[in-house]
Amino acid sequence: MRNLTLTHLTYAGSGRPNASVTFSPGFTLICGDSNTGKSFIVDSIDYMLGGHAAPTIPHADGYSQILLGLKLPDGSPVTLVRAPGSNSIHLHSSDLRDLVHAVPDILLSARRTKSKRDISQQLLSYLGLEESYIRTSEAGNTELLKIVDLTRLAVVTDARMVDQTPVSHRNRGSAAKTAARSVMQLLLTGEDEPPASKVPNVVQRRIQKSKITLIDHLVIGLSAKQSTHETASELRVRQRRLEETLAAATRSLREVSANQAQAVAERAQHAEHTETVAIRLGEISDLLKRFGILRQQYESDLARLEMVSEAGSLLGYFQVGRCVFCGAEPEHQDPRHGIEETTHLHEAITAESTKTQALLTDLKATIADLELQLNELSRQHELMRVQSQELDHAIELIEARLLPAKAELDQILTERSAIERDLELLARIEELDEHRAELVAAGAVPSNRVESFVPTSVVDAFDRVLQQIIERWHLPGAENAGYDPYGGDIRAGGHARAEHGRGMQALLRSAFSAALAQYCLERRLPNLGFLVLDSPLVTYGELRDADEDDLSPEVHDSFYRHFLTSPGQTIIVENTPPPPEVVEQAHVVMFRRNGTGRHGFFPLPFETVG
């Protein structure tokens, strides 16, 4: 992660000796008596990094330029030059430590500008954060990160040290709370907010809310028409299974229908054959009836001929008078006439009988043949009747299978139609939801945008760093320290920071910034790279509650020793002297109002030159 390093702060003015202090890339301690300009140094650093209020003390009169030297992440030096009270900052791509007359490489505004040619965007670009967004309102508005969002956490001036505002908040108010939560998310997780378009005004939002209300009513109405609570994916799965079942049922029904058609056709063909047999039976029966009558006729004729034959003989022999054959009177009768007539009659009768007998014989043969046919056809007809019953039963069985199959198919089709209808409803609802989401995304419903969120695991990890620092400092009554992501402040000793005395609040505020710097640097998360603290120990001594004890020497020494090994750059101004090992290892600048040595940040008046 890219970080910045402060190299020096210099006040320069024509005819005035430079007031300057250099900073080590590690730990710099500016220690000395009160009113020697220590807090002025911290305020000046904050001012040069985009602060609004120019620090003022009488010793600064006559100085026309403030120079803040920085080393960029790539090691190259830059110098920010700003006149006290000016809104312009000159950026020079070199390490300058005296009154500057050169033309700046970049002219920047101390205020935020739309052109982004301001100190905030310039410094953030060095850190790779110039396109990072933070959330600024519950409505979901976002804005580009500002350098002040980082400096207020890393540069703890004496005013911030005792400020009752939560440690992560820029100021009080819900908007500040939202922004602070978003900044902490960026610092602790490295994740910024996606940029959002500007939220509509009140009138536009009212119109959009009306649209959303209408959409909600439509969705409710469509939802009421749904026959199931299944999701679209669940319905599609069921639809696929139903299609498979439908295909199987269709195949089964088609087979049963084919069987039915075949059986019906066979039954019709069988009926046709049966009808043919029945007709033939009727014809034969009718012939037999007729032939029976004819047979009787033949038999009657034969009997009559036999009787005539017998009668003729008798008449010829026993009757006297007119001839029974020719009607001749006895005197005209020839005695041989009777014999001849009788012979002729007998022959005629015999011939007729023979002929009739032949006909009868033929008739009987025909009748016998017809009776055989009748019997055979009757047998076939009976067999066909039985077969007809079997075919009818087979058709009934097929129809018995066909009806449930049709009912099952109808049920499947009905269910499929219901699924298709539900899918259409869900598609419509989804379309309305998308439209509703677009309205919400446009700012109609502010609360619907996901809030900035720092995972609990991240907060726990940060809390461990915070607690370790507090333990290393041996701060009394600060056990179980932790950051409250919702309130934006820290808790320690079972109390919120604001519930401690103001002196302890200053120490907890310092511990929070130190923990935040260490956490981010160790994890290569977004961070300025330096920490500046203004007199947390002396603030505790001055503002501690009556029931709070003075800090023990152990706390002082532990506090200083901690920053010998902490990552990044640390600049602390304090009143109390550090232990010897800190003096040896840190860059210590001592201000003494009395005696030898440097009097303060600004030279004494007699040191004026020019």
Image: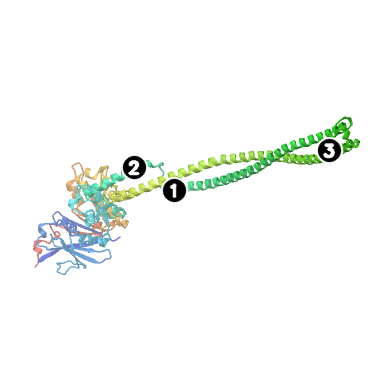
Q: Residues within 10 Å of mark 2 (few under 14, many from 20)?
A: few
Residue 562 can be seen in this image: no
Rendering coords of residue 37 (x, y %): 14, 57
Q: Which residue is mark 2?
A: 220
What is the quadrant of residue 517 in the picture? bottom left
Q: Which mark is residue 349?
A: 3
Q: Residue furthest right?
A: 335
N-terminal-most mark, 3 or 2 = 2
Q: CA distance from mark 1 to mark 2?
A: 22 Å
At label 1, which amino acid type do we have? Arg
Rendering coords of residue 101 (x, y %): 14, 69
Q: Which mark is residue 236?
A: 1
Q: Work out which quarter of the rendered image holds the N terminus and state it.
A: bottom left
Q: Nearer the viewer, residue 359 or 116?
A: 359
Q: CA distance from mark 3 to mark 2?
A: 114 Å
Circle 2: element type? helix
Residue that appears at 10% across and 66% down: 14
Q: Nearer the viewer, residue 321 or 525?
A: 321
What is the quadrant of residue 93 in the picture? bottom left
334 lies left or right of 124: right
Q: Nearer the viewer, residue 39 or 434?
A: 434
Rendering coords of residue 285 (x, y %): 70, 38
Q: Nearer the viewer, residue 96 or 307?
A: 307
